[in-house]
Image (cartoon, helix red, strand yellow):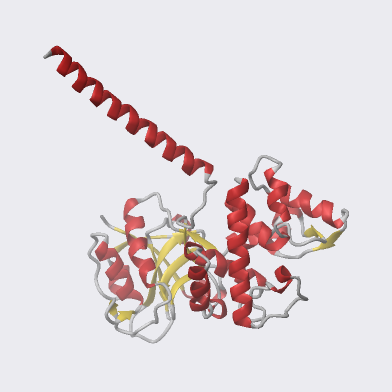
Amino acid sequence: MKLKHLLIGFSGFFVVVFSLLLFITILASDEQDGGFGNSQFGGATVSMEVLAHKPTVEKYAKEYGVSEYVNVLLAIMQVESGGTAKDVMQSSESLGLPPNSLDTESSIKQGVKYFSELLADSKRLEVDFDCVIQSYNYGGGFLDYVAHRDRKYSFELAQSFAKEHSGGVKVDYSNSIAVSMNGGWRYSYGNMFYVALVKQYLVTAQFDDETAQAIMNEALKYEGWKYVFGGSSPTTSFDCSGLVQWCYGKAGISLPRTAQAQYDATQHISLSEAKAGDLIFFHSTYNSGTYITHVGIYVGNNRMYHAGDPIGYTDLTSSYWQQHLAGAGRIKR
């Protein structure tokens, strides 16, 4: 009997130890992955011109096994061409061709293929994901460069790489990101600000507040859908207040139907006080007979997610939204 108990006890102890070791192995594997996976990006605040190419990007992202990186690829396209050039992803040079040699679909196909190759190389070299973004601009040599220097992207490494390849030659660069970081210059090789340029168009999908997370998990299902006046469910698509009411309802929060009524139901705060999950209200965007005429979901960093046309993200610092801004509202829970 004692032997039987000992065997049972040992078996239980073995299972616990094995499970713990398995958990540690998985955790270590995740850490070594360097942040791979696009789950932290909930969307891309890109232009209508770029968004029009999303179906083609999705097509080739699926073909090359990088479907989870569609938002990153759209942000890259925004930086490369704004969605307006023929060689929309500026990928001709990755084939050794002169710039702008490819037509639009060929450009997207090659751009996605090239990105997938960089991604695979980065995993082999165990460097982080920002290196993939920068290498789309610099070329794969940057991955090797970082692999021999702590395996983690930094702006300083991007800058030193450009310095070496340009012979230290500097050029003026008036981009606002560059101006804020160094006064407005770069080395004349590629663009050492490329990671920051791309990431300005990416929006996080991870929120500290569980309710805000639940709201956005639902809202992101409808990104790219058309605006439908009076729409309030996935069967019809949505207008602005219909989208808000539906997504908050899925998170267990009951809101009235119209933008004005939603404004009346919230605690009014300034935009500077707003947190992810709060609502942003606008006045006089059209003649509706009420003061408040539009509403969106605040996601942080002066951006909102709303039922524009199409449904998606927008920058609140634009002159249009600033002109019509009424303020933010917090749900009274």
Question: Which residue extends farthest left?
Answer: 1
Which residue appears farthest toward the top when viewing the image?
Answer: 2
Would residue 222 appear left or right of 257 to someone viewing this image? right
Residue 310 locus on image (x, y percent): 44, 79
Residue visible at 52% across and 52% down in the picture: 36
Q: Which of 199 and 253 is in front in this view?
A: 199
Q: Quadrant of residue 258?
A: bottom left
Instruction: State left or right for residue 74 relative to residue 276.
Output: right
Depth check: 230 or 114 in front?
114
Please tell me which residue is depicted at 82% across the width and 63% down the height of the picture. Answer: 172
Can residue 128 be seen here? The reply is no
Residue 328, above or below 49: above
- Count of labels in the image: 0
Percent from the top left, x then y, of residue 194?
Answer: 68, 60
Question: Which corner quadrant holds the N terminus?
Answer: top left
Depicted 291 relative to depicted 164: above or below: below
Please state the horizontal and vertical placement of residue 320, each as a whole percent of the image: 53, 77
**235 shown above or below 166:** below
Answer with left or right where residue 84 lies relative to residue 220: right
Name the residue: 78% across, 49% down. Answer: 160
Q: Can residue 149 be seen in this view?
A: yes
* Image location of residue 216, percent across then percent down: 37, 62
Q: Which of 247 and 322 is in front in this view?
A: 247
Residue 266 is drawn in which quadrant?
bottom left
Residue at coordinates 52% horizontally, 46% vertically from top-left?
Answer: 33
The C terminus lies in quadrant: bottom left
**Position of 190 compared to 6: left or right?**
right
Query: Can you say whether 110 is above or below 15 in the image?
Result: below
Residue sitting nearer the eye, 88 or 17: 17
